[in-house]
């Protein structure tokens, strides 16, 4: 499933037991489970709940980058590729909501426990 984030720019990162990525045009990605980052020939696994704040420096360096592709597959895995080639991958979590992507007017995609995707479409403008 294409999440419609192509061309959105990462504007800010907040880490507080979750990883919250704010994109342009009022889109957000919230990651609540361990994830993987493939960047500059390195592969890193991080957990927003367990890893130290300084371990997230590679994520902070993505601020200003543009999303080239953002997809969710039938297993509930989120994949986001940025303009510099960095790939962020969030697998599903068996017990918790691993991630969600929200957009303006109520659009929402959630990887529910076990990886099933729940989706809500944007409300039409009045």
Image: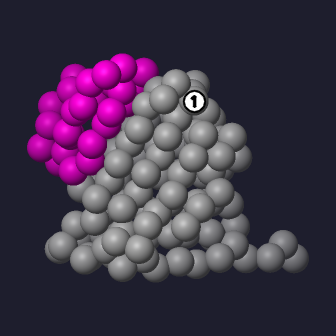
In the image, residue 120 sits, relative to residue 18, either above or below, namely below
Residue displayed at 36% across by 62% down = 77
Q: State the image coordinates of residue 106 (x, y, percent, origin top left).
A: 63, 70
Left or right: where 104 falls relative to 3? right
In the image, residue 53 sits, relative to residue 29, either above or below, namely above
Residue annotated with mark 1: 83
Residue displayed at 19% across by 45% down = 47
Residue bounds of the magenta highlight: 34-61
Is residue 44 a member of the stretch shown in magenta? Answer: yes
Left or right: where 45 falls relative to 7? left
How many other residues sit within 10 Å of disc 1, few (<14), some (14-19) or many (≥20)?
some
Residue displayed at 34% across by 71% down = 75
Q: How many marks?
A: 1
Q: Residue 54 sits in which quadrant? A: top left
SS assignment at label 1: loop
Screen quadrant of the C terminus: bottom right
Q: State the image coordinates of residue 11 (x, y, percent, origin top left).
A: 57, 33
Residue extending farthest front: 41
Q: Residue 24 sits in which quadrant? A: top right
């Amino acid at each position: 499933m294409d999440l419609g984030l192509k061309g959105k720019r990462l504007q800010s990162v907040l880490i507080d037991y979750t990883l919250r990525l704010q994109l342009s045009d009022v889109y957000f990605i919230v990651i609540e489970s361990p994830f993987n980052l493939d960047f500059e020939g390195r592969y890193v696994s991080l957990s927003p709940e367990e890893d130290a704040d300084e371990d997230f420096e590679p994520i902070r360096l993505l601020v200003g980058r543009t999303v080239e592709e953002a997809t969710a597959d039938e297993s509930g895995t989120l994949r986001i590729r940025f303009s510099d080639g960095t790939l962020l991958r969030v697998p599903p979590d068996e017990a918790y909501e691993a991630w969600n992507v929200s957009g303006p007017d109520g659009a929402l995609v959630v990887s529910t426990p076990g990886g099933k995707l729940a989706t809500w479409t944007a409300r039409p403008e009045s």
